Image: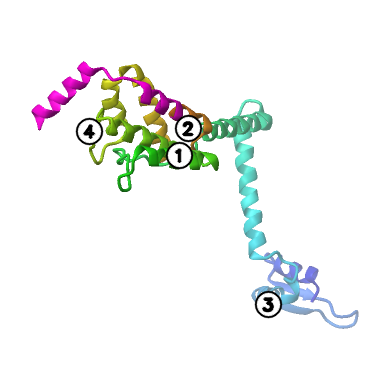
Amino acid sequence: MPRTAVRTLLRAGDTSVLSLPRSDDEPPVTIPRDPAREAARRELSKRMYHENDPSWFQRALNAFWDWVDKLFSAASTATPGGTLGLVVIVVAVLAVLGALWWRLGTPRRRPVSSPALFDDGPRSAADHRAAAEAHAAQGHWSQAVQERMRAIVRALEERALLDNRPGRTADEAAAEAGRSLPDHGDRLRAAARDFDDVTYGGRAGSEQAYRRLADLDRDLERSKPHLADNADRNTRQGATG
């Protein structure tokens, strides 16, 4: 049965019977409406009529793109400037997100309190400096920044400007050292921020940050503490002890 004939049968919902002429001298064959409709359904269910139908994946993809097209059409209608205005807004949003990602780096959850500055066994300031220089020579700036900050704090402990206290954070070390070396207080706090950003903030270290810490380390070696402030600190520690 040709497809057109089958479709004709399906559209025959307003007639009680269907007449299919067979020849000029034979009476037409009449088929009741319901059996004709059922015969049409059976005919259309044959595989030969569905060989070129799209796959389920293609149908789903077409439905998705139709939805996207309707979404953009609705958005462009509500946006000043139509489709061009919508494109400008999308590009502007993507540019802002890209600038934020470039400026802030990959976002990571920061701990509620900064972990300890030293995470391994005791090493001397010279050991930390040697490790920092080795990382810097290979361009591993994050590790170089970490080791140089540890060298700074360990050197202050070796000079008795800081007490040797396990669990101290970089921020705590900078704040305590700033009382004995107030001329370098701002640089010490900046060094602690660089250490925290690299170690816990997910930002990559840079050569500039490492050079700042190296310069600070050398300047601190030549600096003399304010003895009065240092004596007051030791007195307070003795009283609390």
Q: Which residue, given by chain and number where applicable, does mark 1 sit on?
A: 132
**Disc 1, disc 2: CB below 8 Å?**
yes
Q: Give coordinates of residue 165: x percent, y percent.
A: 23, 38
The amino acid sitting under disc 3 is: Arg
Q: Which mark is residue 201?
A: none
Mark nearer the viewer, 1 or 2: 1
Disc 1 element:
helix
Q: Select label 3 or label 1 by which is in front.
A: 1
- Residue type for callout 4: Asp
Confirm whether residue 72 shows in the render.
Answer: yes
Quadrant containing the N terminus is bottom right
- In front: label 2 or label 4: 4
Distance in Å between CA atoms under marks 1 and 2? 9 Å
Residue segment shown in magenta: 214-241
Q: Earlier in the sequence, mark 1 or mark 4?
A: 1
* First in residue order: circle 3 vs circle 1: 3
- Residue at image mark 2: 210
Query: Badge 1: how crowded within 10 Å, few (<14), some, or many (20+)?
Result: many
Give the alpha-carbon distance from disc 3 to disc 1, as whole Å.
81 Å
Residue visible at 72% across and 78% down in the picture = 31
Q: Is residue 172 left or right of residue 38?
A: left
Tell which circle, 2 or 4, labels the residue nearer the N-terminal end: 4
Residue 163 - label:
4
For residue 180, which quarter of the picture?
top left
Q: Amino acid at mark 2?
A: Tyr
**Which type of secondary structure does the marked residue at label 4 adopt?**
loop
Q: Which residue is mark 3?
A: 42
Q: Compute the Cα span from label 3 to label 2.
A: 80 Å
In percent of the image, x 36 and y 20: which residue is there?
186
- Residue 32, how many percent across, how many down? 68, 76
Secondary structure state at the residue bearing disc 3? helix
The numbered mark, 3 or 2, whose residue comes first in the sequence reads 3
